[in-house]
Amino acid sequence: MAASESKKKKIAIIAVLVVLLVAMIVAVTVGVKMAKKGNKKPTKVGAKKKAIETICQATTYKETCQSSLEKETGDTTDPKDLIKAEFQVAADKVNEVIKNSNTLKEYAKDPMASQALGVCKELLETAVEDLLGAVDKMGPFDVSKISDYLADLKVWLSAAVNHQATCLDAFEDTKGEAGEKMRGFLKTAQELTSNGLAMVSEISRLVDSPKLNSHRRLMSSSKGGQTKRNYKPVPGWMSDRHLDLLTATPESLKPNVVVAKDGTGKYKTINEALKEVPQKSNEAFVIYIKKGVYEETVIVDKEMTNVVMIGDGPTMTRISGSKSHADGITTMNTATFAAVGNYFVAKGIGFENTAGHVKHQAVALRVQSDFSIFFNCHMDAYQDTLYTQTYRQFYRDCTITGTVDFIFGDGVALFQNCKMVVRKPGEAQACMVTAQGRTDRNEITGIFLQNCTITGEPDYMAVKDKNKAYLGRPWKKFARVVVMQSSIDEAIAPEGWTEWTGEKYHQNCFFGEYGNRGPRKDMTQRVKWSTVKRLTPDQAAAFTPARVFEGNKWVKPSGVPYVPGMMPV
């Protein structure tokens, strides 16, 4: 990417946040006032200050918010002028970051630090493109569609928060000053992103209130005004894919390409087949991968949308790799398979990383694909098996095996009818099923296990009293995990949860349990943290597919087995 294009995109990420979020707050606030009092202009006395204070009230970094809106706006109270001023301040800040970031190459002599810079570049570009794509989809603001509007925006902004945090994480275990300098460069951008997410969360809280809902109905029924585009958070074509995943076979899906290790397909490798995938397509591109072990690193990149992969079963069709952090590779880049392009679907495939517990972080599958679905798949490794990195993800009838933090990440990831199997770890290792990475209290992300089976392989059960296993530990400050309607056996220690070594994240996380069964369902012996919650039925229902990521709109049409609410167990 040319330097000028990169600069424009990085400026745009902050500008888009401000334009979208401030405009939404102004639209809701003004709309409610119009509904109550009619179209009356506010007085000019203190109007500018009050407008800025109102916009910034819900944010964590109020000084950053207010100072970014107060500069160079004169006496205006016009939201458009305030937005323009914020755009300019943000542009100046990002220009400064871009200029300073160029100097980091001098400090990245360490190969791992050099890789970290590459990770940062990739993630920041992804965040920019995601937000610019969001603007294109949004169209004119439509109060009647605000709930759908907010659902997408919260996912995208949560991802933007995560991308910046992951950029900084990539510098862990690196030498030199590059990591600390990058942290300083990103400080304002992170604060602006967090503030934007806080604004959206506050709007979401308001629009869910009965009082504002009455105003929304009033505004939606009014005649006249600007013609608005019918906004749909989930592309309409998704309901027309008719994948029928429950009964789908390679024959019924009519694959575009067949991959066969034995030479009976068009290609012998998956990467060769991916070269045929059209960019940004709304049509499902089906790749049938015949039985065999495919030893290759596969990335379904962000341009490859709507890819469907079907195998001969997760024990027959295996995609295998062995990259690890111990070999000098950043965790994100150790993944054997990375699903990045949106709307990715996999059925009947096994993903594995064979590096072993001695190599530490070694990812089998990394998922950065919005609206992705995995059905009857296996993910096998040891530490960091499945990286649920960002965006909306649904797993059904899958098996995930590992040792340390073997389901980790910061996506909106829901597992239904899946099996989590603890493997035998290294001599002095404990095991954790989950390690969730929520860094901002307003993120809507989490790892949600529903009607899953949590157990251990025979080799692990023989050492479980020495090498304890837990439902999870908080990877980041606001980690969120919910285990509900699941079977928890003796593989899990009675304490249930454990701390992240050297941190106090357990004081701010959210670990919820509801309606579980099995020998370790008893919560009386759980760790005595206020953050470990016994959920009520209403609280648990908020983490079901229909509620947590509007699964009825995109999971159900795929034909995968799917229960939108509580399961009949």
Image (cartoon, grey):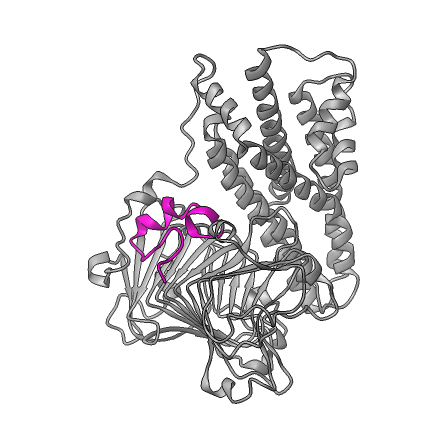
Instruction: Report whether residue 129 is seen.
Output: no
Q: Quadrant of the C terminus?
A: bottom left
Q: Which residues are magenta?
A: 543-569
Query: Residue 319 at what x, y percent from top left?
Result: 40, 72
Left or right, residue 189 beside residue 162: right
Query: Residue 341 at what x, y percent from top left?
Result: 44, 52
Asked if the stretch drawn in magenta spans residue 566, the answer is yes
Measuring 71% from the left and 71% from the top, which residue is drawn there? Answer: 501
Judge by depth and name the residue closer to the eye, 361 or 547: 547
Quadrant of the image occupied by residue 254: bottom left
Left or right, residue 460 beside residue 288: right
Left or right, residue 493 beside residue 257: right
Judge by depth and name the residue closer to the eye, 75 or 40: 40
- Relative to residue 453, is residue 535 depicted above or below? above
- Relative to residue 331, is residue 15 depicted above or below? above
- Relative to residue 43, is residue 537 depicted above or below? below
Judge by depth and name the residue closer to the eye, 50 or 136: 50
Asked if the stretch drawn in magenta spans residue 446, the answer is no
Measuring 31% from the left and 58% from the top, which residue is drawn there? Answer: 561
Instruction: Report whether residue 363 is seen.
Output: yes
Quadrant of the image occupied by residue 518: bottom left
Measuring 26% from the left and 49% from the top, which residue is drawn there? Answer: 242
- Relative to residue 419, is residue 548 depicted above or below? above
